Image (cartoon, rainbow, N blue to C red):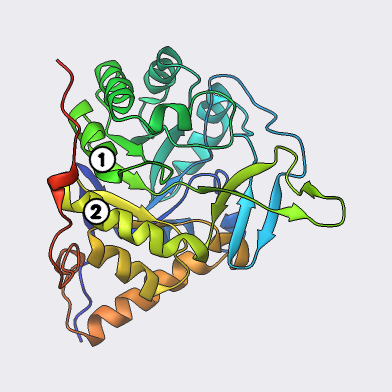
């Protein structure tokens, strides 16, 4: 039986398979390399980078929920210069693409980090305008279509690198946000980031997380993520990396059918460090069994009409 072609082309970012790992769930790959052959992953979205090192939020920063995890880590990271000097050369030893997730507190900071990370060995930038766990930036940029357009456009002008824009689910209409990112110059979208949530300790009558509210990820958010990928893919012409609760090959196929050109695994890495290789192998076997020759034969092939674009209100600012 002939093996299918698992390679994907995300508008210029070519991966040998559609499996990536979501930023913030895989560090810089060092710890997971003890369990997974990083060569078998299409791309690694490294931990979110800021201009200066960040210690992150006060603890507790993580809480379990019935079908997922609530986190408020606050972008703890060693800073972009440390990453470029210490982690990027090590990642370059593997046959996987490196995607730098970049975060700023204002547009100028986003542009500066984009310039610094547009180097050999970084194959794409993931512009994070959707993080709910920091006091400034992040979600503030990602919920208004005009602001999304503005920040993406300015970062686009600051770098010629492949540019992915990570979208938030905490918005009124994901189609407008997706259209704004595309109009601003995004090469690709990634979605979704976490949904905002809260967990309360009934004995202390206080939230478990130190900051009270955090980001919910894991199986609980998957139906929301699939819906949003379907809606965004119905209105944009650029590829989408779908993520949100993917734990097995069937979840991955759902995202591909909804319109994602590749998928990203996040919270499941904490449960099963080998999940990326398992999803890849199971996906390949399922495709062979069902006669699919390539990933392209699955992307957007949902047997259902596209989402109604009539409700979109975004217009490119003059």
Camera-side residue of 39 and 45: 45
> Where residue 133 appears, x then y in whole percent?
58, 36
> Where residue 303 appears, x then y in whole percent?
15, 73
Q: CA distance from mark 1 to mark 2?
A: 9 Å
Circles 1, 2 touching at the beta carbon (< 8 Å): yes
> Where residue 306 appears, x then y in whole percent?
14, 59
Left-right relation of 205 to 80:
right
Q: Which mark is residue 167?
A: none
Camera-side residue of 84 and 44: 44
In which quadrant will I find the C terminus? top left
Q: Is residue 236 visible?
A: no
> Residue at horizontal 64%, vertical 42%?
213
> Residue at horizontal 50%, vertical 20%?
105
Left-right relation of 259 to 192:
left
Residue that badge 2 annotates: 231
**Tag count:** 2
Camera-side residue of 311 and 190: 311
Residue that badge 1 annotates: 178
- Picture quadrant of residue 209: top right
Q: Residues within 10 Å of mark 1 (few under 14, many from 20)?
A: many
Q: Residues within 10 Å of mark 2 (few under 14, many from 20)?
A: many
Camera-side residue of 113 and 37: 113
């Amino acid at each position: 039986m002939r093996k299918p072609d698992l390679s994907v082309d995300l508008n210029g970012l070519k991966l040998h398979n559609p499996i990536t790992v979501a930023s913030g769930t895989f560090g810089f790959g060092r710890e997971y390399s003890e369990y997974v052959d990083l060569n078998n992953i299409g791309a690694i979205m490294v931990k979110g980078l800021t201009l200066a090192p960040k210690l992150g939020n006060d603890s507790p920063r993580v809480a379990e929920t019935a079908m997922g995890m609530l986190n408020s880590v606050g972008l703890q990271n060693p800073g972009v210069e440390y990453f470029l000097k210490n982690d990027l050369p090590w990642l370059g030893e593997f046959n996987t693409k490196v995607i730098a997730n970049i975060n700023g507190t204002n547009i100028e900071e986003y542009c500066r980090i984009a310039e610094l990370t547009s180097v050999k060995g970084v194959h794409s930038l993931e512009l994070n305008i959707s993080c709910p766990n920091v006091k400034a930036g992040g979600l503030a940029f990602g919920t208004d279509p005009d602001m999304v357009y503005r920040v993406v456009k300015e970062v686009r002008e600051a770098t010629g690198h492949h540019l992915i824009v990570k979208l938030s689910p905490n918005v009124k209409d994901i189609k407008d946000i997706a259209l704004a990112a595309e109009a601003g110059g995004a090469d690709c979208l990634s979605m979704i980031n976490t949904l905002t949530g809260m967990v309360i300790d009934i004995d202390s009558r206080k939230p478990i997380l130190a900051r009270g509210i955090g980001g919910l990820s894991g199986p609980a958010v998957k139906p929301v993520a699939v819906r949003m990928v379907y809606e965004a893919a119905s209105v944009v012409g650029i590829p989408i990396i779908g993520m949100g609760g993917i734990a097995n090959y069937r979840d991955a196929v759902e995202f591909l059918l909804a319109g994602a050109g590749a998928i990203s695994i996040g919270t499941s890495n904490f449960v099963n460090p080998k999940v990326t290789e398992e999803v890849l192998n199971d996906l390949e076997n399922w495709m062979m069994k069902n006669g699919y020759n390539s990933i392209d034969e699955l992307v957007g092939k949902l047997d259902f009409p596209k989402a109604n674009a009539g409700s979109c209100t975004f217009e490119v600012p003059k």
